[in-house]
C-alpha cells in the first residue's frame, strides 16, 4: 500500500493545486466519483484492453461520470490514462481528502457506536472531541457495533479513542487480575 501512496501522492497534490482555485467540495465529489468508477471490474478491463486507444478509454471513462466534468478534470483523466495510472484514483481520492483536511486544519473521524446515534448526538460528540484533538472533526464513517455494549470508539487519523463500556470492563478486568 505504501507504494500506491507514493505513486499517487504527486497526482493528488497536483490536482489539489488546481482545485484550490475552485470549489474544493465539488472537486472532492468529482474525484470520489472518478475513484468509484475506476474500481469497477469492467473499467479495469477497459483500461487494460490493448485493442483500445487511450482516446477511446478516456472518452468511455468520462462518459461513465455524471455531469460536471470540467476541462481540468478531463485533462487530469487524460494524464492518468496516458501514464497508466487511472487505477490509482481511489488512493488519489484518499490523499486529496487529506490535503483538503490539512488545508482547513481538520481531520476525518470514524465513529463506531454501540447504538444508533442521532445527528445531534454525533455533533455533540464531535464538539467535545474537537477540544481534545485541537482541530475540526468531520464524521467520515459511522458504524454500529453492539459488542461495544455502550459508548463509542472514535478513530482520528492514527489515533484511537475507545470510550466504550467494553473497554472500561476490560480495564477493570485487567486491574483485578493483576
Image: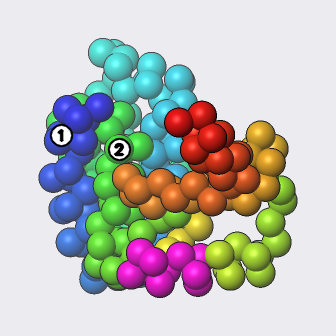
In the rendered structure, find residue 91 and report the number of the disc placed on it: 2
Per the rendered image, the range of residues in magenta is 126-135
Q: Nearer the viewer, residue 175 or 148?
A: 175
**How far from the left and from the top, in percent, is residue 107?**
42, 69
Q: Is residue 139 left or right of residue 113?
A: left
Tell me if label 1 and label 2 are in contact, CB under 8 Å: yes
Magenta-colored stretch includes residue 175? no
Give the color scheme: rainbow, by chain, secondary structure or one colour: rainbow
**How far across and down, in percent of the image, does residue 156 sit?**
45, 61
**Which label belongs to residue 69?**
none
**Residue 35 percent coordinates (x, y):** 45, 46
- Of helix, strand and loop, which mostly describes the magenta segment? helix
Residue lying at 53% horizontally and 76% vertically, measured from the top left: 129
At mark 1, the secondary structure is helix
For mark 1, does the 10 Å Cα neighbourhood hold few (<14), some (14 to 19), or many (20 or more) residues? some
Classed neighbour count for the residue bearing mark 2: other residues with Cα under 10 Å, few (<14), some (14–19), many (≥20): many
The residue depicted at 65 percent of the width and 47 percent of the height is 172
Residue at x-position 53% and y-position 24%: 42
| Mark 1 or mark 2, earlier in chain | 1
Amino acid at each position: 500500500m505504501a507504494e500506491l501512496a507514493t505513486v499517487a501522492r504527486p497526482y493528488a497534490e497536483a490536482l489539489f493545486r488546481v482545485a484550490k482555485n475552485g470549489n474544493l467540495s465539488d472537486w472532492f465529489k468529482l474525484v470520489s466519483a472518478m475513484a468509484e468508477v475506476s474500481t469497477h471490474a469492467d473499467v479495469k478491463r477497459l483500461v487494460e484492453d490493448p485493442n483500445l486507444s487511450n482516446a477511446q478509454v478516456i472518452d468511455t471513462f468520462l462518459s461513465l461520470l455524471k455531469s460536471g466534468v470540467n476541462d481540468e478534470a478531463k485533462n487530469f483523466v487524460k494524464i492518468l490514462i496516458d501514464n497508466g495510472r487511472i487505477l490509482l484514483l481511489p488512493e488519489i481520492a484518499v490523499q486529496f481528502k487529506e490535503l483538503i483536511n490539512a488545508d482547513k486544519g481538520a481531520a476525518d473521524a470514524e465513529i463506531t457506536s454501540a447504538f444508533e446515534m442521532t445527528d445531534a448526538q454525533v455533533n455533540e460528540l464531535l464538539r467535545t472531541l474537537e477540544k481534545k484533538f485541537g482541530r475540526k472533526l468531520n464524521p467520515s464513517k459511522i458504524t454500529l457495533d453492539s459488542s461495544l455494549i455502550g459508548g463509542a470508539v472514535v478513530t482520528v487519523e492514527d489515533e484511537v479513542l475507545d470510550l466504550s463500556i467494553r473497554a472500561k470492563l476490560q480495564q477493570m478486568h485487567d486491574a483485578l487480575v493483576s
